[in-house]
Image: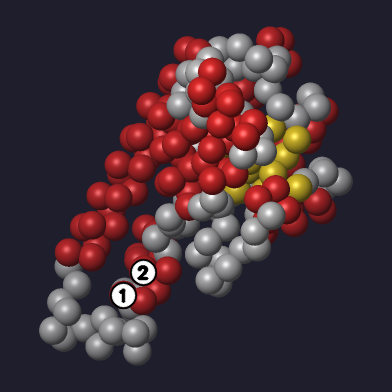
Amino acid sequence: MSKMQRALISLTDKAGIEKFAGQLQDLGIEILSTGGTARKMRENDITVKDVAEFTGFPEMLDGRVKTLHPKVHGGILFQRSNASHLQQMDAHGLQQIDLIAVNLYAFDKATEDPDCTVANAIENIDIGGPTMLRAAAKNFQDVTVIVDPADYPQVISEISENGNTTLATRFRLAVKVFQLTSTYDTAIAAWLAKVDTNTNAHFKGGE
């Protein structure tokens, strides 16, 4: 397994990020990020490259599109041992992303409010986060994916010792991703299933 080069961090729950990102930086790992997560790290003297700079494409549609780009998902999904993948990465000028640390918009917290409208609930459905998480988890042979800050210490320990995480750790973390995204989608489906589209005044257009 080659040495870890690049991490993408985008967090709603930023607990422990200053220490974790600082340790990654000390290990020589480039950090990509977006929005409030990038600001939080810069406030703590951590060097961060905006995802928009990495992709060459700006955030758009009120932040709905930030990480949904081939330079992000190609960097996550390509198989490092696949010669054809390596050739395609080189041909398109894509760079590897070895670690994803992401947690999701708090849909459950938003919808706990009894006055939550359908429009507000919809805006709290995370798209880019689950997409990156699932991509990284699918490619656990090569990519480390973190959804729980409790896993930061072990990841740092393994990178410090070996230059990367172990396959066993990457697999364990991938399982946690699919458990999370399954629970997340179930919560969304359950809440939306209760919406009465005939009587809910907020169903159309966020009225």
Label 1 packing within 10 angstroms: few (<14), some (14-19), many (20+): many
| Distance in Å between CA atoms under marks 2 and 1 | 5 Å
Residue 97 visible somewhere in the drawing: no
SS for tag 1? helix
Mark 2 touches mark 1? (CB < 8 Å): yes
Tell me which residue sits at (30%, 42%) in the image: 182
In the rendered image, the vertical position of residue 30 relative to residue 12, given as above or below: above
SS for tag 2? helix
Is residue 193 left or right of 17 when viewed as pictured? left
The image quadrant where one finds the C terminus is bottom left
Tell me which residue sits at (43%, 46%) in the image: 130
In the rendered image, the vertical position of residue 174 relative to residue 185, given as above or below: above
Look at label 1 and name its amino acid.
Val
Dividing the picture into quarters, in which one does residue 24 lie? top right
Tell me which residue sits at (36%, 43%) in the image: 181
Is residue 23 left or right of 58 when viewed as pictured? right
Look at label 2 and name its amino acid.
Ala
In the rendered image, which residue does mark 2 sit on? Answer: 121
In front here: 72 or 39? 72
Is residue 20 left or right of 181 when viewed as pictured? right
Residue 133 visible somewhere in the drawing: yes
In the rendered image, which residue does mark 1 sit on? Answer: 118
The image quadrant where one finds the N terminus is top right
